[in-house]
Amino acid sequence: MANNSMKNIFARAQARIPGGVNSPVRSWKMVGGDPKIIAHGQGAYILDWEGHRYIDYVGSWGPLILGHAQAQVVAAAKQAIEGGMSFGAPTEAEVELAELVHDYFPAIEKLRLVSSGTEATMSAIRLARAYTRRSKIVKFDGCYHGHVDSLLVRAGSGLATLALPDTPGVPENFTKDTLVIPYNDVAQLESLMSTHSETIAAVIIEPVCGNMGVIPPRLDYLAAVRKVTAKHGAVLIFDEVITGFRVARGGAQELYGVTPDLTCLGKVLGGGLPVGAFGGQQVIMDLLAPLGPVYQAGTLSGNPVTVAAGLATLKVLGSDGVYEDLEAKGQYLEEALIQVLKRWRLRGTVNRVGSMLTLFFGVDSVTHAEEARRCDQQRFARFFHRMIACGIYYPPSPFEAAFISLAHSQADLEQTVHCFEEWAQSECDG
């Protein structure tokens, strides 16, 4: 093309792709402006089409815990692709991946691979309904579980609602069996479970909320969720698509010492390639076809290239000191950002678990979705654009997690804090 500037490329994208993007948050709608067109990634950095380099805290929205184009992952994917991109038949590598996942997540006695997190949660819920022979599902306001019709809902007023869909195209009838309550509120869960004890098939939860920004569970909250679901015979599903292999080698269930019945995985599991998985107790998983009556299938499930990239990633994550390194980087960045907020008397807070964090402006604490929604979105937009100008690629939404990788150096973190300090000063002076 004669004109391949980012502006021209995005104009072409808008002409042929809805909004110019293939996933809504990429559009920068919440911060304004046109998204950068990315040409290359290496380590902790990405380069846009015009050659500007950024320290990347998006990391493909979480999968790239080793950084971009990590050598072992690239080598494994190349070797796999040279042997054939897809077979639609079993391979030894997918067995090895399932065995390694079980080593890291002992509660996953059996695993089925799919191609996305949405497929994983959808299938886990179908399985839970078949196992319990019940229909209702409990989810939590602010927890996102993919674009499954029955889960695209949020809380209404009162204790819980038969929530209306969040998007046109989802009939109300599809969400009539979805109950939504606040995250981090044990009393509401206990009340709801008592009221609907005979009809609730499953409770699905992000053990660390990652889609209203990072919101950690309160002390003993997950243990209480486990206790009440067991009491009422409901399947507990941990959606660890984000937290799996991210907050600990064995995910949030290892970090907090709480064992769910089913677990959904994705992101890190694929090493940067599309993947999802769900697994858990053998007695539940064996209801899946071909062993049982619950049908679930996928043409590209267990894709050999994705499996190779995932295996390479998980093997690196099995090395000593990996999670201590990630924790140290996360702690440094959290504490440094908080100090800048205090120094310039900017109201805000930082929520962090391991190597994922969110900077909220205009609020003192965020423990559930309603508090997150009160954050200062205009100030966040100003922060975002100043950081981009300074060479820091931060998520273009106040309600997303920023991700640190093993590829981020101390110098990268210090440069990030320096840029934040410059912005904070300008925000106060302005």
Image: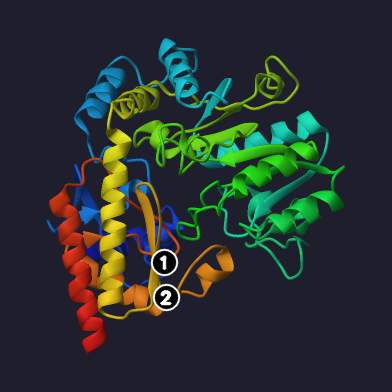
Q: Who comes first in sequence, dot 2 or dot 1?
A: 2
Crowdedness of circle 2 by 10 Å Cα count: few (<14), some, many (20+)? some
Q: Establish if 28 lies above or below 325.
A: below
Displayed quadrant of residue 118: top right
Displayed quadrant of residue 165: bottom right
- Which residue corresponds to mark 1? 398
Displayed quadrant of residue 347: bottom left
Q: Establish if 84 lies above or below 71.
A: above
Provide residue 55's location: percent of width, then percent of height. 20, 54
- Whether tag 2 and tag 1 are in contact, CB under 8 A, the answer is yes
- Which residue corresponds to mark 2? 377
CA gap between label 2 and label 1 equals 7 Å
Q: Residue furthest bottom?
A: 430
Quarter of the image with the C terminus is bottom left
Residue 173 makes an appearance in the image: no
Provide residue 39's location: percent of width, then percent of height. 20, 49
Q: Residue at x 38, y 49 (%)?
A: 61
Amino acid marked by disc 1: Pro
Amino acid marked by disc 2: Gln
